[in-house]
Each structure stands twice: as C-alpha cells, then as structure tokens.
Amino acid sequence: MKEIISLLLLIIPCFGNNNVFLGRRRKQQQQQQLISGSLPEKALDLLASRKSQRLSELDDGIKSRSSSDNRMLQDEETCSLCKEYNVFEDDIIDGTNKTCGDYNEEAKTITNSTECSKYDILFPSCCDGPPQYLCQQQIRSNIIGDGLDFTVSPITSLREEFNITVSLQYESMENIDVQLGSTTIFVTLYLFWADKRLAWDVSDENCAEFTTARASFDPELTEIWVPDFDLLNRVHGFDEFKLEPALILSDGFVIWPRSGSLTAFCQFTGLAKIPFDSLGCQFLFGPGSANSYLNFNYQLDPENGPKGFSKGALDPTYNEYVLDEDLSFAGKDPVLGFMYFNFYFDRA
C-alpha cells in the first residue's frame, strides 16, 4: 500500500504541472484571439501574408545553409526557439506543415547567431512566454516614446518616392440629393505604408508580431505619423470618421483601417434620363496640401483588380439607388496625382 501511495505522489505533480502548462497555453491563445479579433479581416490577411513570407524566407535559408555559414554563438550558447520558456511542441504553424517542435529541432542545429535570430519570429506563436499585455507594453515603450516625432514623415530619401497604398471598400449607398448635388456613401478605407522607425525585432522581450497605436489627422490625438489624405470634393470627409487605431507589424508596416460616411459634391451624369437614370458621381481623393504630393506616391491597392476598389458584404434592406459595379471604376490622374472613384448608381 505504501508503494502505491508513493507512486501516486510522484504521478500527481506531473499531471498538475502539465495542466498548468496547458492552462497557460489556452490563456495565451485567448489573449491573442482577443487582440486579433478586433482587427478587420483585410488587416488579418495582410498580417498572415507577411508572416508567411518571412517563414518562407526562413525555410529557404535552412535549405541553402552551408557549413561555411556557421559561426559559433557567443559564449557557446545553444540556439533555441523559446530560450528559457516552454515550447508548444505540437502546434502547427499556419501556412506550413511544420510544428513548433519541428522548428525548435532545426534551431538547435544552428551555431550562427544571425541565423538563430531569424527564428525569433516564431516566439509569439510557439512559446509559453510573458502575457501579451506585457509584450505590447514593452514594444510600445520602445517604438512610441519621446524620440518619435510624428510630425516628421518617414521619408528616407528625397531621391525616392514614398509609397502609400490606398484600398477603398464600398459598403453601401446612403443618400443621393440631386437638388443639392451631393452623394453620401458608406465606405471602409485602408491606408498602408512602411515606417521603419516603428520596426522591432521579435524576441522573448518584444514578444508580439504586431501592436496598435492611436492614429488621427489631429496632432493632439495621434501617436504616429499618418498620411495627409482626404476626400477633396467633400461635404464630409475622413476627418469626421470615428477614430480607429492603426495596426503596426514588427517590420514597421502600418495598416490603418477606418469606416464611415463620405459626402461628396457631385456634377451628376445621367440626369437627363430621369426616372430611368443611372447617376454618376466622382469622388476625388488626395493630400489636403500641395506639399504633401512631394515624394509621396499614392497608389491603388493592386489586390482590388482593374476596378480599383472592392465591394463589401453589407446589403441594406432598401435603398432608392444601388451601385452599378459594371460601370464604376477608380483611377489616378497621371499629372496631378489625385485619385478618382467614379461611382454609378441605378434606381433599385
């Protein structure tokens, strides 16, 4: 009997430690889901795409590694995925057929410190590290602080254009006022750009792949630099949208999604055919000041195809007018640099 009791005392702590470990894993997954669950689908797709690209580069590096690349880690350290933290061995990394355990075994074979650091990108997904809120706090204190002047743009050279990608998603028609010559639509706008000042190396301390920051045209409200971009022929523009945080990826890539109503002054086309009309209204977008065109290259999101915009899933119960997707299109003036979205609406 004593032998049985002694055996149980040895087994029970093992199960207890494993439950604690699994409990922490569930908690970490819930924290990550809570943070990512508040992000728009397009932002999540971009996050997954850029992570997949970095993992592909990591795998290509493993295949091409030769013995001449190997240099000993300092102090003869052993390369590992999670340092002193536990590894979630069986978790499969999205977009691959490998588990965290597979990558951890690969890392152990590396003696080159530069090669070893490339595995840090997997720390948030594979390691039982610090709570996500501590990771976020650490990163924000590093990249958003007294040293960042958000009134200065992230342009690195006057010889190169600074690219800002514009992705407009049409959601629904709200109102057409022919007498006042205005059109109101509900849209989601995404602006993408790269700010290397906001980049960080993912590690056991900077243990998150992304963070968020307050973003606004108002210098009193923003924490980062944002592009000067608005509806030019506006009655109501982007500056009246609800404030939304920007998503910052670890390589400094910024995604700023915003949703709201835009009202534009229109010189309607198609009025002569009322009531069998297909009304056209042009929405013009660009920087609010002439200086903002210098070195800034505003470009349409190529993911939206030849139309230049995407159509959301929002389907109102009734509208007098509906978007004619076949006629509508977007483009960019090659001389003046502003963007135009020509929307046509048919009577429902």
Image: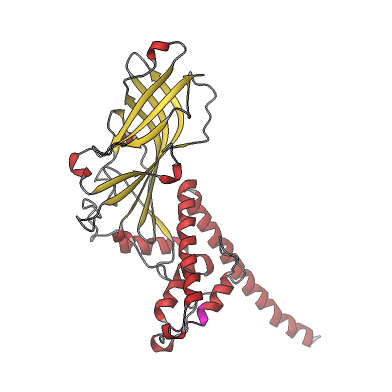
Q: In this view, does 244 lie to the left or right of 104?
A: left
Whether residue 110 is in magenta: the answer is yes
Asked whether the viewer can see residue 25, the reply is yes
Region rendered in magenta: 107-111
Q: In this view, does 105 lie to the left or right of 175?
A: right
Foreground of the two, 132 or 51: 51
Whether residue 75 is in magenta: the answer is no
Q: In this view, does 220 lie above or below 264?
A: below
Residue drawn at the location 27% of the way across and 32% of the way down = 232
Residue drawn at the location 41% of the way across and 87% of the way down = 72
Residue drawn at the location 46% of the way across and 85% of the way down = 67
Q: Is residue 214 above or below residue 104?
A: above
Residue 271, image quadrant: top left
Quadrant of image for the N terminus: bottom right
In the rendered image, residue 105, in percent from the top left (x then y), is placed at 56, 78
In the rendered image, residue 94, in percent from the top left (x then y), is placed at 56, 61
In the rendered image, residue 81, in percent from the top left (x then y), is placed at 50, 75
